[in-house]
Amino acid sequence: VRVTFWGTRGSIATPGQETVTFGGDTSCVAITGLDPGHLVILDAGTGLRRLGTQTPTRIERIDLLLSHLHLDHIIGLGFFEPLFRPDLAITIWAPPSGVPLLERLGRYLSPPLFPVRLRDLSCELRLCDALEEPVVRGEFTITAASIIHPDTAVGYRIEAGDQVVAYLPDHEPALSPAFPRLRPWTSGAAVASEADLLIHDAQYGPDEYQEHVGWGHSSVTDAVAFADLVGARMLALFHHDPSHDDEAVERLEREARATSRGVQVVAARQGATLTLGQ
Amino acid sequence: MGTATTHVGACHRTRRWRILPPMAQQPVELILVRHLASRLAVPVFVVDPSGDLVYFNEPAERVLGRRYDAIRFMPFEEWTTAFVPAAAGRTLAVEELPLVVALRKAIPAHSRFDIISGDRVRRTIEVTAFPIIAPTERLLGAVAMFWETDER
């Protein structure tokens, strides 16, 4: 299983010299397995545009899993070239709501915000609710779970063979009771349980978090505490704050490592690929 | 251009079901309800879809006469009868309790009745209960808030 980070930034894209190491594109992660024709994509931030330009023509099926519909997680959709390929079958998964996904996504993918409508895309497009029952997509078994973040948001658990990737890019588990002690009462604990790679919100430093309680994001130290609680093997700090330059992210990565009780900690870098199961 | 775009409830029918990850976790909606309840001055009960009491806050501990941390769970059969709920001179049936109505009918419910609380004192309380229903329309449990009243 190969996991590639195409966008690691939270909230808004931050291109520039100060973010060249960890990247300035917003959330987008690609997962590939043994099937060269199948691609799983986590979120559609600005990183999705570049991924689209480099998606091999051998790809026949894409499952695009949206954690939620905040703009930094869907803004890349309109610029994703594969959506305009008639030979491609693309399924977009998103948290369930009383409003159909077609209508919710259509608020962005329609004038006046965008010139192209969803119905004008030429791929074979399906829109599905990401429910909490596992679904098998090729070699991947995908489970969604509602997690703490303003508006409806889910985390994903992607299993392939004996490898597990958990993706909770926007998540504030610290609002769970007695965090981080009560695993059954901790948001996201089941979907992230024993993950080989946990990609988790780490937007703030511990001091910054105190000014942002309830905003739906985590400090790096809470991300580590969550990872240790659920028994993750590797934690990728993700959703870097747009105000953090590379130096700040490196400092937070060091702080996070210092609090780990066992989980291996890295700060997600745009362009980096992690290979699991080796 | 213009291939049909479908919003697929139907796609879920082709799923192959598997057992959830090997670790139980309360739904995030109940986690948030507990988070709120732990900060309220009024007693709050939270039950799961089976009706078992999975959380009560500190003010509720005074009514129950038990500490949450000491028991953390109370089966449906126990909490529905422990307080001998009564009104108009008769013991209430379980299905008359607002929390049970909220859970079984998935509607809000309110009523006033007497209980014998954990300190063995008979008190008159008013209870408002409501179901917790996820965006998927799955019933996740129910919540009851109650107030002691002087009226008999």
Image (spheres, grey):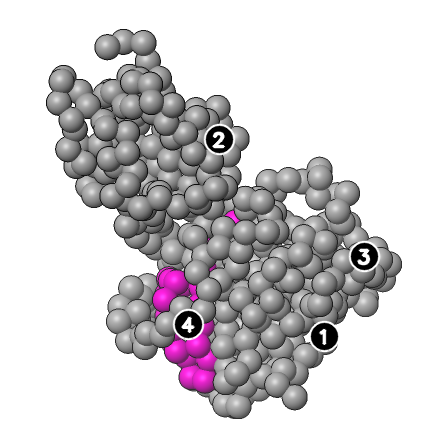
Disc number for residue A271: 1
Q: Residue furthest front?
A: B120
* Above or below, comparing residue A153 to residue A214 in the picture: below
Q: Relative to residue B48, is residue A278 drawn left or right?
A: right
Residue type (three-letter) at the residue carrying disc 1: Gly
Tell me which segment is drawn in magenta: A120-148
Report x, y in % for residue A276: 63, 82
Chain at tag 4: A
Badge 2 vs badge 1, beta-carbon distance below 8 Å? no
What residue is shown at x 16% (from left), y 28% (from top)? Answer: B92
Front-lying residue, A250 or A262: A262
In space, the residues marked 3 and 1 are separated at their CA atoms by 23 Å
Please count the marks in the image: 4
Residue type (three-letter) at the residue carrying disc 2: Glu
Residue placed under numbered mark 4 in the picture: A91
Q: Earlier in the sequence, mark 3 or mark 1?
A: 3
**Residue A87 lies in magenta, yes or no?**
no
Chain at tag 3: A
Looking at the picture, do discs 1 and 4 lie on one chain?
Answer: yes
Residue type (three-letter) at the residue carrying disc 3: Glu
What residue is shown at x 23% (from left), y 27% (from top)? Answer: B85
Q: Nearer the viewer, mark 4 or mark 3?
A: 3
Residue placed under numbered mark 3 in the picture: A255
* Above or below, comparing residue B121 to residue A158 in the picture: above
Q: Nearer the viewer, mark 2 or mark 1?
A: 2
* Above or below, comparing residue B83 to residue A150 in the picture: above
Residue placed under numbered mark 2 in the picture: B58
What residue is shown at x 45% (from left), y 50% (from top)? Answer: B28
Residue type (three-letter) at the residue carrying disc 4: Thr
Q: Relative to residue B55, is residue A230 drawn left or right?
A: right
Q: Nearer the viewer, mark 4 or mark 2?
A: 2
